[in-house]
Structure formats: C-alpha cells, structure tokens
Image: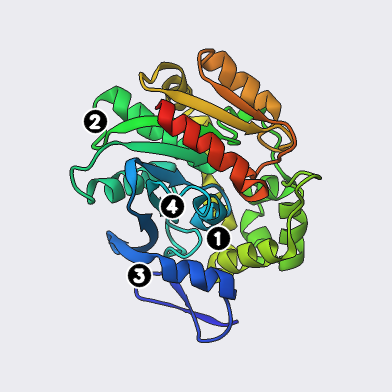
Amino acid sequence: MRRRADSRGAWRPRPGRELTERVREWRAAGHSERFGERAIHVFERPGAEPALLLLHGFPSSSYDWRALLARERERAVLAFDFLGFGLSDKPRDHVYSLLGQADLAEDLVCRRGPGGPVFVVAHDMGTSVATELLARDLDGRLGIEIAGALLFNGSIVLERASLTVAQRLLRGRFGALFAALASERVFRHQFAALFSAAHPLRAEEAEDQWSLIRHAGGRALGHRLIHYLDEREAYAERWHGAVRDWHGPLSLAWGLRDPVATPAVLAALRELRPSAPVVELPELGHYPQIEDPARLAEVVRRAAVAG
C-alpha cells in the first residue's frame, strides 16, 4: 500500500485496509495525545491506586496488554505505544532513544496531575525504559512517584541474552535494507519462535501484530528502532545499578522458555538484586502476557499489592 509523508516526516497510510478489525477496536478504546509534535496512542482506565504503568517491548505495542487487562479490572491503568511503535507516530528521521521513551512515559504520568504513585510493569525493551526511570529516581530528578516495579522477560543484561537473527541483521551494516525487505512471512516465522510450544502463536495474533508493525510505514523502521540494544550497552552501568540500588520494591517474573531473554538473563538479574522476589513461569516463552494472560495478571496483582 502506498503512503505519503507529512510535513513532520511521519508517514501516513493512504486510505485502504491496513489494521485488522481487532486492532481497530483497540484503537477505538484509547485516544491520541500530543508529545511535542508527535501523536501517541494512549489507553487509560480509572480504578484503584496505585495505577499500573504498562511499558511494552520491541517490536510490538500496548496491544500486548489487552488480554491481561481484561482479567485485571480493579486497578487504574495507563498504557501507551512508544514513539515509533503500534498506533503512535512513526517519524522516519527520528533517533529512537530509550531516554526519549522514558521522557514520554514520565510526561504522560505527570500530565495526569498530582495523583498517587504508579506501579511499573515492564516487558522486553520496556524494562530498560523502566530502569531509566528508576535511575532518575536514584538521581533525585524523577517527576513521578513509583510505588514498585515488576520486570519480566527483557534482555536487561544484554551479554547474557541470545539475540534473534532479525535483531542481529537489523543492527548490522545492511540493517536498513533488511528492514525495507521485511515481509509478513518472515515476521510470522521470527515472532512464532518467541512463543513456547505449550502456548504457540495464534494466527490471529500474528495478523494483528503485523498490521501494527506495518501501520503508518513502520515496517521499514526496524533498523532505527533496534537502537535500544546499543543503548543497553552504553548505559549498562547506569541501568544495572538501578536494578541493584533502587530503594523501592522491585520484583521479577520470567517465562523460562524464552529463547532471547533466556534464564541466563534472569540469573544475572538475581546476581544484581538477590533480594528481588521472582516468579518463574516454566512453560511460558517471551510473551507471557499473550501466552497466558490470566497467569500474568495474577502475578501483576500480587506484585502491585506487595508494592
């Protein structure tokens, strides 16, 4: 489908079929907010405090949380698509830094007024955004209050992770070409490998996720979005230190069948923070919130209460 660039460099789809019906329903349940010159897709819901601040991973979006939220209805929720992901704007000339994504998270919470603290739930790439927020708290310059944090299945200690073929290609010399040649068939193969044998990727889920990646020209941005892995190396001391030293309650949950953020990553995090409560999920892969949303909702519920 042909697209055109707007005056800010974000690519807009021409009229036609792009998003699946399920994704369009998710979009209708949320709204768009401005962050600088960019539009950000936001889902929020009132409820008990502390509110859940949900930070998604690469290459997906807040759509990952929908089944979990259908099972956890008591707490207030703030979920959004990071810039460059899902239903948010996807400028082609932008440097996608996790520091900027942390600015976005902090801004979205701050603009909701002097409410209570938030409880951060973070997956994959979102775990590094979370640790940047914790590091800012340690620095005394965080503008929001964090009641606690739950991190799961993120390659926070990058040297212990096993990157996918797609991640390695996107980081390489020909990353832009690989991104431009991305296809639904290749995506489905790569994405399915992240799921456990007991909870395989469903065809509808794959269709939805691909439509979100393609939306607004996002298919060709993978080589830019993968920059977060470089930052995990550049800021390793800062972010690992936040895991180790942050003063609030921090817990971990882990799908042990994850082929990327492997149990070796979990072991490294346990070395950094031996006191952190850990919930092991032996039969789940990289996406526990999609594979078994009821189980992860229970984990989130208990962690937020403890926090």
Between 161 and 244, the residue placed more toward the observer is 244
Callout 2 touching callout 4 (CB < 8 Å): no
Q: Residue furthest bottom?
A: 15
Q: Say what amino acid the circle numbered 1 marks.
A: Leu
**How many residues crowd mark 1 within 10 Å: few (<14), some (14–19), many (20+)?**
many
**How many residues crowd mark 3 within 10 Å: few (<14), some (14–19), many (20+)?**
few
Q: Which mark is residue 221?
A: 1
Q: Which mark is residue 141?
A: 2
Between 298 and 206, the residue placed more toward the observer is 298
- Asked where in the image residue 80 lies, by quadrant, the reply is bottom left
Comparing labels 2 and 1, the label whose residue is closer to the camera:
2
Q: How many marks?
A: 4
* Above-or-below relation of 303 to 59: above
Q: Residue at left 65%, top 28%? A: 280
Which residue carries the number 4 mark?
Answer: 95
* Above-or-below relation of 250 to 167: above
Separation of residues labelled 2 and 4 (CA atoms) = 23 Å
Which mark sits nearer the N-terminus, 2 or 1?
2
Callout 3 touching callout 1 (CB < 8 Å): no
Look at the image and tell me whether residue 42 can be seen: yes
Q: Say what amino acid the circle numbered 3 marks.
A: Arg
| 265 with respect to 74 (left or right) | right
Which residue carries the number 3 mark?
Answer: 8
* Above-or-below relation of 56 to 281: below
Q: Describe the element under mark 1 as helix, strand or loop.
A: helix
Separation of residues labelled 3 and 1 (CA atoms) = 16 Å
Q: Say what amino acid the circle numbered 4 marks.
A: Val
Separation of residues labelled 3 and 2 (CA atoms) = 31 Å
Callout 4 touching callout 1 (CB < 8 Å): no
Which mark sits nearer the N-terminus, 2 or 4?
4
Percent x, y for residue 230? 54, 38
